[in-house]
Image (cartoon, rainbow, N blue to C red):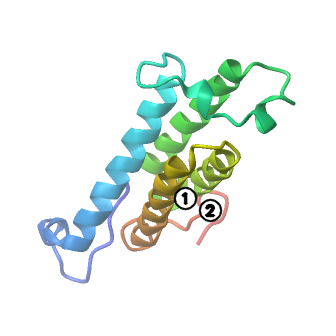
Amino acid sequence: MATTLSPAGASTSDVRSDVTYQAYAVLRTAFTVAPIVFGLDKFTNLLVQWDRYLAPVLSDPLPVTPHQAMYAVGVIEVVAGIVVLLHPRLGAFVVAAWLAGIIVNLLLIPGFYDVALRDFGLLLAAVALQRLATRFDPRPSLWPLRRA
């Protein structure tokens, strides 16, 4: 877990009882667990048949089947969840960008606009996580690429 910043003189218990920290913790947990679970499910399709969520206009030019493409998607999602766990300030950017790509993909498939709208809400939550992480994750967003 990343070290949390706290106001001068505030104890760890004071920070954890802060509603802002609680919102950060909820979002960080959600954006760690969900991408990992959904990413791993790309290999099993227990939750849903993920291939149907890939726009043909994007999958047809690929040298692999949509099912095989979902393996790559799964790996990316698992990595995104791990990045949120280890460095939420950067990971939230990664998840927000990934969700933007998912939204574009879904808008290319008739009948999936409701899912795209839901994912837009998730994108806004990822942006909120990134903003909260600026308070609770002291490392710069591009750490370790850029030192403060």
Viewer-proximal residue among 44 and 76: 44
20 sits left or right of 34 in the view? left
Q: Say which amino acid is labelled 2.
A: Leu
Residue 4 makes an appearance in the image: yes
Disc number for residue 142: 2
> Height in image: 83 above or below 18?
above
> Height in image: 76 above or below 87?
above
**Residue 110 position in % (x across, y down):** 65, 44
Q: Earlier in the sequence, mark 1 or mark 2?
A: 1
Residue in view at x 57 percent, y 60 percent: 93
From the image, tell me which residue sits under label 1.
90
The C terminus appears in which quarter of the rendering?
A: bottom right
Label 1 close to label 2 by CB (< 8 Å):
yes
Disc number for residue 40: none
Helix, strand or loop at disc 2?
A: loop
Q: Could you classify mark 1 by the number of other residues whose Cα lies within 10 Å: few (under 14), some (14-19), or many (20 or more)? A: many
Q: CA distance from mark 1 to mark 2?
A: 7 Å
> Height in image: 98 above or below 42?
below
Viewer-proximal residue among 30 and 67: 67
Residue in view at x 46 percent, y 53 percent: 118
**Residue 62 position in % (x across, y down):** 83, 28
